[in-house]
Amino acid sequence: MPVLARPGRLVAAARAFARAVFADTPGSWPRAAGLMLLGGLLEGAGLLLLVPLAGLLVDGGGRAQAIAARWFALVGADTRIERLSALLVVFVLVMLVRAGVLLLRDRHLAALRIGFVERERVALLRALATARWQDVAGLRHARLTAAVGGDVQRVAAAVHYFLQALVAAVMLAVQWLLALAIAPALALFAALLLLGAAALALPTLARASRVGEAMTAGQLEMMHASGQFLAGLKPAIAHGAGPAFVAGVEADARRLSAVQLAFERHHSLARVTTASASALVGAGLLLVGTWWAMPVASLLAAIVILSRMSGPALQIQQAAQQLATLLPAHAALTELRRDLAPGVLPASPAPVAQTPGVGDATIVLDNVTFAHADGGGVRDIDLVLRPGEIVGLVGASGAGKTTLVDLLAGLIAPHAGSVTLGGLPVDHRCIAYVAQDSFLIHDTLRHNLTLDGPAVQDDVLHEVLALVGATALIDSLPQGLDTLVAERGARLSGGERQRIALARALIRRPALLILDEATNAIDIAGERRILDMLAALPDRPVTMIVAHRGESLARCDRVLTIEAGRLVEGRDHAG
């Protein structure tokens, strides 16, 4: 994760964040800026009415009295009660218009914030979905979960505070300009004090950034520990090791809580310090104005306006503290997308007309090599898989089976050599991959079978389900195909999930079907019937079966053995 605690890096991170926010919706920002400015001007107009009011109530002379005279002449008020009534009417009208403008402003800024955050989330998911598999596989699962969940939410909070600071800055500028028009000397003196306070606050922003980095790292570790806890909960309970798991998660939680408490103490201290400084500044301005013998009406109006500046100034200070704490989350998201970007796949796949059909789907691996960073992989693979052929793949753990399968599936690209399907580069639309851990989502069986693909008629779904032996399962469910399978398909057994995953693969009518231990949860008799069904298909795809059970390889036309990354044996099943 990037380190932002240094002032230069913090400023650079803030600049990059601002660029991202502004660049995301450039057409909407002129309206947002206009509404913020109009809201500030109306706030200033309401404050400006204090000048004639002060001139009416206090015979102080000076600039305030002259401005008051122009106001009363403009509205045609002669007596004191007429002048007071006119001021109140104008004030109420200004406040009503201001309320309407602020409502529009807040709605528009909320739409900008929500839209930006959702686009950040979608951009991250798109980067994950289009990246090379080896780039995704090398990431910690906790990092992905933290990015999609916690980091995106913290970016949402960062946008909120960023927009809050912008609104406060506009209000502060308008108020200061009003004070400058009424009491130039006091306004300049107040500006110097504000600049000095800002300079003193810079080190606290660096500390807030360090706290933010610690919180981001702590949440990542907490996510990692929680994921391990949930993944290992069943065996932990079975072995009586549940308390040890809880103790580890509890230690991570304590560390994260300590960081969060440190931030709250730091933020509270900064808030109290700023509020106290505002009170001292107000008292100091009153003393300075009196010492300069300013007219009473001008002094009162200027003090009220300058005291109102403490609100936006405090908002800016608090927003800056929060933003410095939250910027590491945006930096983490940006870094994750950058890690995935070098391997992004082409956005537009080959036209469907160029996709090979089952009939001409000869698969050729020509001198293919892929080396992992740890030294594993495959080397010098030459292999031809003919249309309709059923091929088994066996080998010891770590021999290269997964790498070879990933190359066939197009999940990774070879470092040398080529993989073609029907004479064309591998296209994911021609491939169906069924893994040992069947992927089902919390939705209906129908949706799990099609996964937002083209609509499939019920008779086709039932036909394919019958091929994989799932008809009895569907008939036993209360809503049939429209039954919810629960998260990860928990409502189904392991074998039932594998049958549904296999049916989903066949619905795609693939040119290449990869079964990676995809039937090991099904009983041997059921597995034999499924493999017999695959072998009997009139227009069957090339089928690669990765398995350890001899029964799973019984229907293969030939069995390949991989050892230390090389194909060392290719024989037909009878041999």
Image: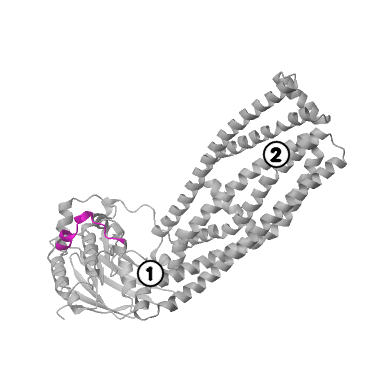
User: Which of the pair 425/390 is nearer the observer?
Assistant: 390
Q: Quadrant of the C terminus?
A: bottom left
Query: What residue appears at the point 76 percent right and 40 percent down from the top-left corner?
Result: 303
Which amino acid does the dot numbered 1 rest on? Answer: Ala
Q: Which mark is residue 416?
A: 1
Asked whether the viewer can see residue 409, the reply is yes
- Asked if the stretch drawn in magenta spans residue 501, the answer is no
Residue ID for mark 2: 175
Query: What residue appears at the point 73 percent right and 49 percent down from the top-left corner?
Result: 278
Q: Which contiguous range is marked in magenta?
A: 472-486
Using residue 536 as the reference point, say whether residue 514 is left or right of it: right
Using residue 403 as the reference point, say whether residue 539 is left or right of it: left
Q: Earlier in the sequence, mark 2 or mark 1?
A: 2
Asked whether the viewer can see residue 4, the reply is no
Task: Say if 309 sits above or below 379 in the image.
Answer: above
Task: Say if 319 sits above or below 433 in the image.
Answer: above
Please name which of the two marks, 2 or 1, marks the residue nearer to the observer: 2
Q: CA distance from mark 2 to mark 1?
A: 67 Å
**Callout 2: few (<14), some (14-19), or many (20+) C-alpha neighbours within 10 Å?**
many
Which amino acid does the dot numbered 2 rest on? Answer: Gln
